[in-house]
Image (tube, rainbow, N blue to C red):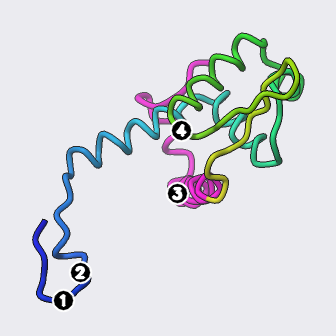
């Protein structure tokens, strides 16, 4: 990393591995790139929940919710703790998740239906 003569580097002095940053961002977007995982994250913004509660609220199969929670946990977006025979899930960084959703809403508003209509990003359904 290049440093200036001061004690704190300026943005221009910090070398960023652009490739690594792009890969990390793409991995984050992939983790959040499934409508069920987005729904789970949005519901966990309301507070911690177990799989049964998420299954009931989202109308998804228990195995589907568990699979998506495992992905979100592996990505560091949620954590779990045992409560009796169940596990309770919570967001690891709720404020950051809110920020990502707010930024997404802003960008979606600015681009209109372009993302939804794009043949490369459109969800099957």
Q: Residue at x 18, y 89 (%)?
A: 6
Q: Earlier in the sequence, mark 2 or mark 3?
A: 2
The correct choice, above or below, for 39 with respect to 104 in the image is: above
Q: Residue at x 68, y 40 (%)?
A: 41
Distance from disc 4 to disc 3, alpha carbons, whole Å, reads 24 Å
Cβ–Cβ under 8 Å for marks 1 and 2: yes
Location of the N terminus (image quadrant): bottom left
Q: Earlier in the sequence, mark 3 or mark 1?
A: 1
Q: Earlier in the sequence, mark 4 or mark 3?
A: 4
User: Is disc 1 surrounded by few (<14), some (14 to 19) or many (20+) residues within 10 Å?
Assistant: few
Determine which residue is flagged by label 1: 6
Determine which residue is flagged by label 4: 76
Q: Earlier in the sequence, mark 2 or mark 4?
A: 2
Image position of 95 (left or right of 115): right
Q: Residue 89, image x and y in percent?
A: 74, 34
Which mark is nearer the camera, 3 or 1? 1
Determine which residue is flagged by label 3: 107
Image position of 85 (left or right of 45): right
User: Is disc 3 surrounded by few (<14), some (14 to 19) or many (20+) residues within 10 Å?
Assistant: few
Location of the C terminus (image quadrant): top right
Distance from disc 1 to disc 2, alpha carbons, whole Å, reads 9 Å
């Amino acid at each position: 990393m290049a440093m200036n003569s001061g004690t704190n580097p300026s943005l221009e002095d910090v070398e960023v591995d652009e490739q690594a940053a792009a890969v990390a961002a793409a991995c984050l977007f992939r983790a959040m790139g499934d409508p069920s995982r987005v729904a789970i994250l949005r519901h966990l913004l309301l507070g911690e929940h177990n799989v049964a509660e998420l299954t009931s609220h989202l109308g998804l199969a228990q195995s589907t919710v568990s699979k998506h929670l495992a992905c979100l946990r592996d990505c560091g977006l949620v954590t779990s703790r045992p409560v009796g025979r169940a596990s309770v899930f919570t967001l690891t960084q709720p404020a950051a998740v809110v920020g990502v959703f707010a930024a997404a809403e802003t960008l979606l508003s600015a681009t209109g239906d372009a993302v939804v209509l794009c043949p490369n990003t459109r969800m099957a359904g």
